[in-house]
């Protein structure tokens, strides 16, 4: 469900009966809430291809921002939220994907002081 701190779920609204998002015929999907899930860009692209008019709620999906680095268009509060979600996701996944996303948002000065990623990762994991 929306806003689920454990990683959320997917909730969709369709114009006709729904038998599952990808397995059945959803008719004309109107909206899809995947906020705070571990959705990937590939998944979002597939959803947009199948239901181009559907409104997507992607709030808190940190994996969608990993290659954007320090995006000045994002408000600071959103960046901090994405970094925290990425770190939480990294702990659950047991890899450095979330740490890499978190580090990609570092300012140039911060990245110089705490980087490269291997140093940043060691610093975070020992903290």
Image: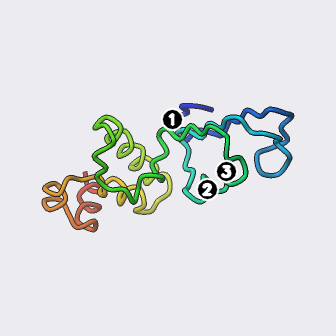
Q: CA distance from mark 2 to mark 1?
A: 24 Å
Q: Residue at x 28, y 65 (%)?
A: 117
Q: Position of residue 51 (x, y in %)?
A: 71, 47
The residue pinned by badge 1 equals 5
Q: Secondary structure at mark 3?
A: helix
- Relative horizontal placement of residue 73, taking residue 93 as reference (left or right): left
Q: Residue at x 85, y 41 (%)?
A: 19
Q: Position of residue 36 (x, y in %)?
A: 52, 40
- Vertical comparison of 97 with 78: above or below: below
Q: Which badge, 3 or 1, is on the more N-terminal residue?
A: 1
In this orientation, which residue lies closer to the viewer: 125 or 15? 15
- Vertical comparison of 10 with 92: above or below: above
Q: Nearer the viewer, mark 2 or mark 1?
A: 2
Q: Residue at x 47, y 53 (%)?
A: 63
Q: Nearer the viewer, mark 3 or mark 1?
A: 3
- Relative horizontal placement of residue 127, taking residue 45 as reference (left or right): left
Q: Position of residue 56 (x, y in %)?
A: 60, 39
Q: Which badge, 2 or 1, is on the more N-terminal residue?
A: 1
In this orientation, which residue lies closer to the viewer: 65 or 52? 52
- Relative horizontal placement of residue 90, taking residue 77 as reference (left or right): right
The residue pinned by badge 2 equals 45
The residue pinned by badge 3 equals 47
Please identify the quarter of the rendering in which residue 73 is found. Answer: top left
Q: Are marks 2 and 3 in contact (CB under 8 Å)?
A: yes
Q: Residues within 10 Å of mark 1 (few under 14, many from 20)?
A: few
Q: Position of residue 39 (x, y in %)?
A: 57, 50
Q: CA distance from mark 2 to mark 3?
A: 5 Å
Q: Residue at x 82, y 51 (%)?
A: 23
């Amino acid at each position: 469900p929306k806003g689920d701190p454990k990683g959320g779920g997917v909730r969709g609204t369709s114009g006709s009966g729904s038998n599952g998002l990808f397995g059945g015929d959803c008719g004309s999907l109107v909206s899809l809430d995947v906020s705070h899930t571990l959705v990937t860009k590939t998944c979002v692209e597939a959803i947009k291809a199948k239901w181009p008019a559907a409104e997507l709620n992607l709030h808190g999906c940190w994996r969608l921002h990993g290659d954007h680095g320090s995006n000045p268009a994002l408000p600071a509060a959103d960046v901090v939220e994405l970094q925290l979600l990425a770190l939480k996701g990294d702990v659950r996944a047991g890899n450095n994907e979330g740490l890499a996303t978190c580090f990609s948002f570092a300012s140039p000065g911060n990245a110089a002081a705490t980087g490269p990623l291997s140093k940043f990762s060691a610093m975070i994991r020992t903290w």
